[in-house]
Amino acid sequence: MPKPEYRNPSSHSSAILHDASLHPLLHSFLACTSPSLKICGVTNPAEADQLAQLGIDALGINFWPESRRYCPLNTAREFLPSLQDRILRVGVFVNAEPDLPRSLLSSGLIDVAQFHGDEDLAYCNAFAQEGLPFFKAIGVEHADDLSTASRYHANGILLDAHAPGVYGGTGRVIDWKMVAGFIDQQSTPPVILAGGITPENAAEALLTSRACALDVASGAESSPGSKDFSKVSSLLETVCSLRDKAD
């Protein structure tokens, strides 16, 4: 029986990826042809620099004060500028006043915003109308949870496990086959898969879901906010292996 191969469906080839104004690193991260890796919950300069040196595609900085992986804005200002054009810098926000992500995008401190809370269509699509790039995270428990995903004019849709009152970082796995079915049936922005991704299941997650990228937090840590670089390296090796086969 032949081994499964990473295959990204043509529905990902949306106008989003042909936008000439798209940051090159964002375009590469969302490319349909091969998978990418984002490590989320980075809290300090040393780890951020090491991720960039390893060749990780994107890092996430959590600006939600209630997160166990919260990074104060003053700290982020110390190291994000030096990472410009080295790694995609994603600012993670939960129900923030829109002026905060808007100002960080406009100033160039981050390359893309990730809305991981209860932000509605009007909130998100205001950013689209202004040409400001963003991902929208959706907590998934049942297939019905995916019904609004295609209505967000997002550069990417991030699918995470649903947990009441919790916004990401739960370590819970979602149904990867359901994600694949959603990708096949919908003309969506590129899909980023989160939720319980580890070095042990990363390959299966990508092969089954066929998402364009993995987003990993707890599966790349020794404790919340502290990266385990043996796990990071293992995740990167898996993604690069599938990337080589896709090429």
Image: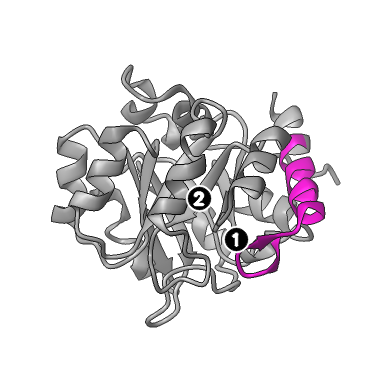
Q: Nearer the viewer, residue 222 or 155?
A: 222
User: Which residue corresponds to mark 2?
Assistant: 60
Q: Secondary structure at mark 1?
A: loop
User: Which residue corresponds to mark 1?
Assistant: 217
Q: Is residue 153 visible to the viewer in this orientation of the structure?
A: no
Q: Where's residue 126, x and y in %?
A: 15, 45
Q: Residue at x 46, y 34 (%)?
A: 81
Residue 51 picture quarter: top right
Q: Where's residue 222, x and y in %?
A: 73, 67
Label count reads 2
Q: Residue at x 19, y 53 (%)?
A: 98
Q: Residue at x 34, y 69 (%)?
A: 144
Residues tagged 1 and 2 counted as in contact (Cβ below 8 A): yes
In this rendering, the answer to whether 97 lies above or below 166 is above
Q: Secondary structure at mark 2?
A: strand
What colour scheme was applied to this rendering of the protein? Answer: one colour
What predominant SS class does the magenta segment belong to?
Answer: helix
Q: What is the C-alpha distance between the residues marked 1 and 2?
A: 9 Å
Q: Where's residue 213, x and y in %?
A: 56, 44
Q: Is residue 230 magenta?
A: yes
The earlier-in-sequence mark between 1 and 2 is 2
Kindly identify the amino acid type of the residue bearing the numbered disc 2: Gly
Please give the range of residues in magenta: 221-240
Outermost residue toward the top in this view: 20
